[in-house]
Image (cartoon, rainbow, N blue to C red):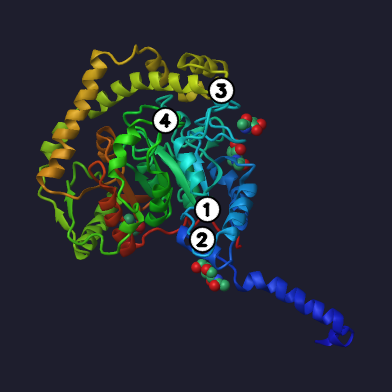
Amino acid sequence: MASTTKSSPLSFSLLLIFTLLFLHPIVSSFTIKEATVADFQLGFQNKSLTSRQLVQFYMDEIDRLNLTFNAVIEVNPDALALADAADRERNAAAPGQSLSDLHGIPILLKDNIATKDKMNTTAGSLALLRSVVPRDAGVVVKLRQAGAIILGKASLTEWANFRGKRMPSGWCARSGQGKNPYTSSDPCGSSSGSAIAAAANLAAVTLGTETDGSILCPSSYNAVVGFRPTLGLTSRAGVIPITLRQDTVGPICRTVADAVYVLDAIAGVDSHDAATTEAAKYIPTGGYKQYLKTDGLKGTRLGLLKDAFFNFPTESVENKTYERHFNTLRQRGAVLVDNLDASKFMEVYEDIGTNEILAMTAEFKLAINSYLQTLEVSSVRSLKDLIEFNNKNSDLEKIEQYGQERFLEAEATNGIREKEQEAIQKLADMSRDGFEKIMRENNLDALLASPLSLASSILATGQHPGITVPAGVDGEGLPFGLCFGGLKGSEPTLIKVAYDFEQATKIRRPPPSVTHSSY
Ligand SMILES: *[C@@H]1O[C@H](CO)[C@@H](O)[C@H](O)[C@H]1NC(C)=O
Ligand SMILES: *[C@@H]1O[C@H](CO)[C@@H](O)[C@H](O)[C@H]1NC(C)=O
Ligand SMILES: *[C@@H]1O[C@H](CO)[C@@H](O)[C@H](O)[C@H]1NC(C)=O
Ligand SMILES: *[C@@H]1O[C@H](CO)[C@@H](O)[C@H](O)[C@H]1NC(C)=O
């Protein structure tokens, strides 16, 4: 070192101290890119990571990448303060005191999930901007209790895709068109922003909602894990509704384990959603993470309804991607029951679409009107007000292009009358004579499906759970998933099966378009 001759011993030791201080965080640096909840918790424990650093990282990534993907509508202005509080809480915890798995972990919420804080809850619509919700959504109460940090609101197909029939997936007036980081095009919906954000690593974990396919489809398209829980397992209170008969809230994350940590935090009774009392019987003592087992497929019976139900992406049929997956499942000890009568099964569901939309249209009017009534402040109080708002703000809300037919059709309904009751009954009968029957008669643990098939409607109308796991990428670079559907309350089985499949295949790759800033 030529300059040492000029340095006094003091400045040399200062330099040394400075170097050590400066090097310290680099030596023990934590790689956030693609890290899991378990990694974060280890990082917190060995003090190579703080919640503040984690939140700051995601805020920087959102700043850098949101313009490209439009996945985030708002960042919580209090996120860093919440992170500091979590860091203080962790440092003050008595040795051996265990904090929740989500403690100090930032989470993005689909913008139809209410937060009583400085953020808006709008379902992507300008009509609800500056409205004030009465309280946090039930799932948000539970997330805060677990110590999770609400990082922001994710974009979505506006009104969870129940406004117009020409609405593109992932578009909403508040943040424009969300983009799939793998293809730069369709992210699928309606929990598009949550899936994009998880895929592009704009959040540690996220929440979506599903009425029919809105968790499973975007998760499949963005190569992430999407979990739609049994109806009522997670509270819908404070979630901008379509219908309480089908709405469910669930995690969208990069791994099955992360999704399960989130499910553990949000599942359970909420006095503001009666369905949670009934569904609580399904929650196992000790929660769900005990089912993250790599021998989870052993001895399971998985139903396979080829062709009709599966709707394989063409590429994967030619390349036999799914065939390879089926072999993997067999090698891991599952029995694939593939002699099921697909045509008889599909016959049961012939009218599913018509009945579903008939019921939903009337249910939506009732549900959205009562949601709007609960707001403490709002310039819209009914579906009628929403329609008028859209007409007045037709340019911003793109009413000419994307329409509001669902709103108009819903407004024309008059409650649950005979024909709606019939439709609802038919949907229940279909589930009994279709999915529930085939599962019970064949003693199946889960049914395999493409998340893009009729499977999503079958699970949704029957109020059954499903999970999709990344399974491949088609010739155009569009990811696709493998979905496991089960009977109500079968989350433990679905977790075992999905986790084992994921660990055996590890197919997910981060989107090539996203180069991460290092931390
Ligand atoms: C702390 O844990 C993280 C996550 O497992 C790991 O990457 C890192 O190397 C650990 N650092 C130290 C100093 O042990
Ligand atoms: C809602 O959004 C507006 C406009 O972006 C913003 O000024 C406000 O702080 C947000 N939050 C609430 C609770 O209004
Ligand atoms: C993300 O981008 C959209 C569209 O440009 C914008 O409306 C939104 O406010 C942005 N979100 C954040 C957190 O900057
Ligand atoms: C299928 O094979 C073709 C040609 O080998 C390849 O270009 C394509 O990416 C493959 N698709 C999948 C899903 O593996």
- The label shown at residue 40 is 2
* Residue labelled with disc 4: 272
Pair 4/2: label in front: 4
211 relative position to 340: left or right: right
Pair 3/4: label in front: 4
- The percent position of residue 359, horizontal first and vertical second, equals 29, 22
Give the answer, above or below, for where 475 lies relative to 432: below
Q: CA distance from mark 3 to mark 4?
A: 16 Å
Give the answer, above or below, for where 273 lies relative to 83: above
Q: Is residue 122 visible?
A: yes
Q: CA distance from mark 4 to mark 2?
A: 32 Å
> Earlier along the polypeptide chain: callout 1 or callout 4?
1
Callout 3 crowding tier (Cα within 10 Å): few <14, some 14–19, many ≥20: few
**Is 507 in front, or is 430?**
430
> Earlier along the polypeptide chain: callout 1 or callout 2?
2
> Earlier along the polypeptide chain: callout 3 or callout 2?
2
> Earlier along the polypeptide chain: callout 1 or callout 3?
1
* Residue labelled with disc 3: 376
Name the amino acid, label 1.
Answer: Ile
Callout 4 crowding tier (Cα within 10 Å): few <14, some 14–19, many ≥20: few
Name the amino acid, label 4.
Answer: His
Q: CA distance from mark 1 to mark 3?
A: 30 Å
> Earlier along the polypeptide chain: callout 3 or callout 4?
4
Q: Are marks 1 and 2 in contact (CB under 8 Å)?
A: yes
Disc 2 Cβ-to-ligand 1 distance below 8 Å: yes
Quadrant of the snapshot with the C terminus: bottom right
